[in-house]
Amino acid sequence: PFITTMARGLLLAAVALTMLVAAQASCPNQCSGHGVCGTNDICTCYKQSGTVWGTRDGWTGADCSLRTCPTAVAFDTISTQEQRVFGYKFTPASTHANTTSTFDSVNPETSLRVTVLHGSTFSDSQDRNFMVRVTVSEETTPEYLFEWKYDTDTMWSNEMTMTTEWWAAQDLGSTGVRVYWANLANTEAGDLYEFSAVHNEGVDFYDRNDNTAHQNQECSGRGSCDRKTGSCTCDVGYGGEACARTLCPSDCSGHGVCQSQSRFAVDAGTTYSNAWDADKHMGCKCDGGFRGLDCAMRECPSGADPLGADGGAEGRDCSGRGKCDYSSGVCNCFRGYFGERCEYQTNFV
């Protein structure tokens, strides 16, 4: 009896210890001190504020141990499923449909269209897989209904009417994501569509806007993020905190100023301020006496053509009567002409 009682006591102690350990289960690495441990032991990483790229996650990873890097408008056009999305992109995860109207590698076209509300934000701070299922597809009635849920949910939403116009697209709850169909006749009850909404550091996303082809990305898509320091290592030819602009060749060789397209427009008495690349593509504005992409070429003196043809005023080097040596800025006059600007004609040729 004593042994039985002792064994029972040890068993109870082991169970209690197991329950205690389970009760004390927590987020991985205690969120590394860079986040808050929440429901289901999931870390919510701290955000960064007061920066040039706005309020966004300052840390990432399951344990918030990885630094995020600055974001800026990407140089590339990012488009999936005919949707141009800013801050998020939609990617087909898988499909199980009764019809051929699915977005897989065999049948790339689908009647389902995914869009977003202009200026809306995704309600989740993580990637999500959406499931959309056709429940009724009756052409004679006609009646077309669907329901949706996250792939992790057990319950489907209430049935909603399928629409065929983007402006009448149905909201998937309060997610900001909307769906509609290009062709209801190609659908059947039981068609199941799955797609992923890829989170891009919590940046707002937009649809049907001229600038949405270039969404915000870490390091502008022109560099790699050092997750230890949170700094961008830019690709060759790009610079800035978020690799958000091109670099001027040879830094204009010390004979010019590196400036944006928007500034060139102002210098020309016009404007170029609303385009996505207005302050991203840079170029050299050379000092007087220099030219070329990097302002390394020395200009030669030029004036009026001695025979009255086009000369310096029309942009011709050496008064139109010689060839400029851009390495020295000295004119090599054609036969029969001389002078610093080749402005004189000899009496004999």
Image: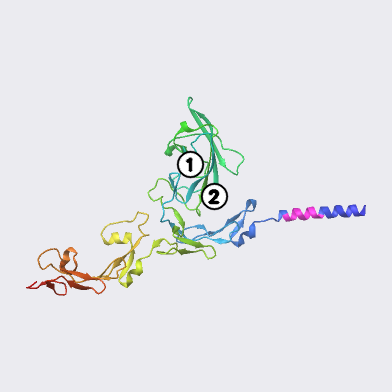
Magenta segment boundaries in residue numbering: 13-21
Give the position of the C terminus as an image quadrant.
bottom left
Q: Choose between 312 and 10: the one closer to the eye.
A: 312
Residue, disc 1? 178
Total numbered labels placed on residues in the image: 2
Q: Amino acid at mark 2?
A: Asp
341 relative to 103, above or below:
below
SS for dot 2: loop
- What is the crowding at mark 1: few (fewer than 14 residues within 10 Å), some, or many (at least 20)? some
Magenta residue check for 310: no
- Is residue 50 at all visible to an observer of this figure? no
Q: Residue at x 45, y 57 (%)?
A: 221
How far apart are labels 2 and 1 at the CA level?
16 Å
Question: Considering depth in this image, is 69 or 51 the residue closer to the camera?
Answer: 69
Mark 2 or mark 1: name the one nearer the start of the chain.
2
**At 54% across and 50% down in the image, what residue appears?**
127
Q: Is residue 15 magenta?
A: yes
Q: Quadrant of residue 286?
A: bottom left
The nearer-to-camera label among 2 and 1 is: 2
Asked if residue 320 is positioned above or below residue 204 in the image, the reply reads below
At label 1, the amino acid type is Arg
Q: Which residue is mark 2?
A: 127
Residue 228, percent from left and from top: 54, 65
**For the stretch drawn in magenta, what is the main secondary structure?**
helix
Label 1 sits on a secondary structure element that is strand
Q: Is residue 127 above or below residue 250?
A: above
Residue 214, x across and y down, in percent? 41, 53
